[in-house]
Amino acid sequence: MSTSIFELASNGALTLPDCLKNRRAMSIIVTVRWGKERYEVSVDKAQPPTVFKAQLQTLTNVPVERQKLLFKGKALKEDGDLAPLTAGATLMLMGSADALPLAPAPQVRFVEDLSRAEAKKAGADATPVGLKNLGNTCYLNSVAQMLHSIPELNGALQRYVPNEPLMRTQSPNAPPHMVTAAAKHLFTSLDGATDAVLPALFVHTFRTVLPEFARTTEQGSPMQHDADEAYNGMISLLAQTLSELPREEGQARGEPTPASNLVAQLLRGTLEVRSKCKEPGAEEEPERVATESFTKLMCNITEQINFMHDGLLAGLDEDREIFSSTLKRDALYRKTARISELPPYLCVHFVRFCWKKREGVRAKILRPVKFPLVLDATPYCTDALKAQLQPHRDALREERNRRIAAQKQQLEAKLAATDAHSASTSPATSTATATSTATATSTAPAPAATAEAAPMDVEAPAPAPTRYVAPSFLAPQHNKTGTYELSAIVAHQGRSAEGGHYLAWVKYGLDTWYKFDDDDVTRCHDEDILKLVGGGDWPIAYLLLYRSVDRLE
């Protein structure tokens, strides 16, 4: 065995520079042939053959114990040395390689482990995530889930660029941008999370900008608040920061204005309000006509109200006191309001909370009031708007009838083909039936007249579930048919107006809803939604969001 140069250096026989020089001198390049392969390998002759073989294993995947190296027809021994090798020498390697290691198998991820964004990209449907309750924040969680269900609003928040320099100032324009930036962060988290989101930043910012929502009880815990008030505050702040979407290709978006912002574009409609004095002495006073904008309709609830339709009319038609120029004092007027422009999204507020003067308390109205899953808004529209909507409604009705007729024809053709197939595959039955019929005919007297054979009654198929889709929300006329589909609900549970619990329901498919009880999310269907009409301790619909639809899919 040769002595290592490092041993010589440690013994003092060579200096370290001399050792390194000798080390370089002992490194040579040799050629190794293995089957059809050729490798140029740098060999350190001072190292044992096992080191050289380890190099070859990395190149050929032939284990050291299987390698047999031949140099000039002789095998290199493992306990020998590499001193006989010279630069440019050719060696032959013999031995079989191990199979290459397989690539790691892709990790299996189940749909329930995907975020909403990942599931959408994969073409799957994953359960959305909820929001954790930070202490009586269910009212804000529910409103956030309802607003998150509006894709145009969600998309606008994703495109929103926070104005951080402005947010650091004391400018009155800073608070709306703070809330919008927090809402963007929250909605992004909801889309990308696989577990419940902690809305700490959003809740803190909302309470800071709107301190009335930061009130606490005598014990110091956060108070419960009205979801309707939170909804009003939220859309008011977003209206100051989110610009209106361009109506035409290439149209630039300017700064938001009271008449031109995303909230107005999506949620604001117009009412034509007519007021007529009811008191004697003002019969000749002309009717007053004015226009008012709205972001939600009120569904008033009295002892006579059983359906949302009646509650909406009660909210549109009511008596109010107005100063009369004829009587020179406040007088009673009959106000009649009708919609002259429909918004893409129609919010309906069930007026469930009222003030009892005698008791001096705020109470909740538990009376059941039924609401539709598909809302026809034409009874609440002006005559002029009804005339504009009628051609589109007729076209939609004709298309629906055509589809039902086509389904009926397909069913009849299928039944006829089935009968023909059955007759052709049962010859014995057909022969026996024909013989029996002939015998009966020969023995029975001939009828005076042959009655026309009655056609077989085919039951008309039930219409297939109709899926409505939203129109282009950028068109000047947002809703062309006056038809809306229920898409989200905020409900209140409990008998107390100052407490209770808020929940949200959001529609995600033809008959698929998700119930958001803070961080607890469960799947449900249309029949579950129709149970939210009121009465008892069951959750009661409070805010309803209807989505504009104008055609069949």
Image (spheres, rainbow, N blue to C red):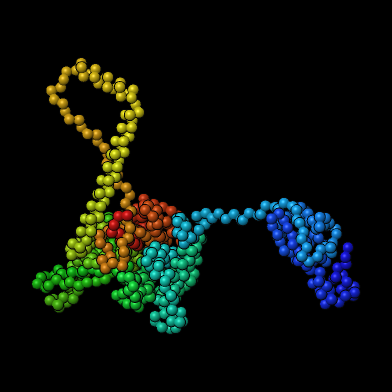
**Residue at figure coordinates x 41%, y 83% from the top left:** 171
Q: Is residue 541 above or below residue 329?
A: above
Locate residue 112 relative to residue 213 in the image: left or right: right
| Closest to the observer, 62 or 241 | 62
Work out whether residue 401 can be spotted: yes
**Residue at figure coordinates x 31%, y 67% from the top left:** 474
Q: Is residue 422 above or below residue 94?
A: above
**Residue at figure coordinates x 28%, y 65% from the top left:** 478
Locate residue 377 relative to residue 91 in the image: left or right: left
- Give residue 459's position: percent from left, percent from top: 27, 39
The quarter of the displayed image where residue 543 is located? bottom left
Direction top: furthest residue: 443
The quarter of the displayed image where residue 223 is located? bottom left
Q: Is residue 90 above or below residue 461?
A: below
| Closest to the observer, 332 or 197 | 197
Work out whether residue 301 can be spotted: no
Locate residue 53 relative to residue 253 in the image: left or right: right
The quarter of the displayed image where residue 272 is located? bottom left
Direction bottom: furthest residue: 170
Figure disc tally: 0
Image quadrant occupied by the N terminus? bottom right
- Give residue 509's position: percent from left, percent from top: 38, 55
| Closest to the observer, 56 or 151 | 56
Image quadrant occupied by the C terminus? bottom left
Locate residue 5 relative to residue 470 in the image: left or right: right
**Residue at figure coordinates x 81%, y 69% from the top left:** 26
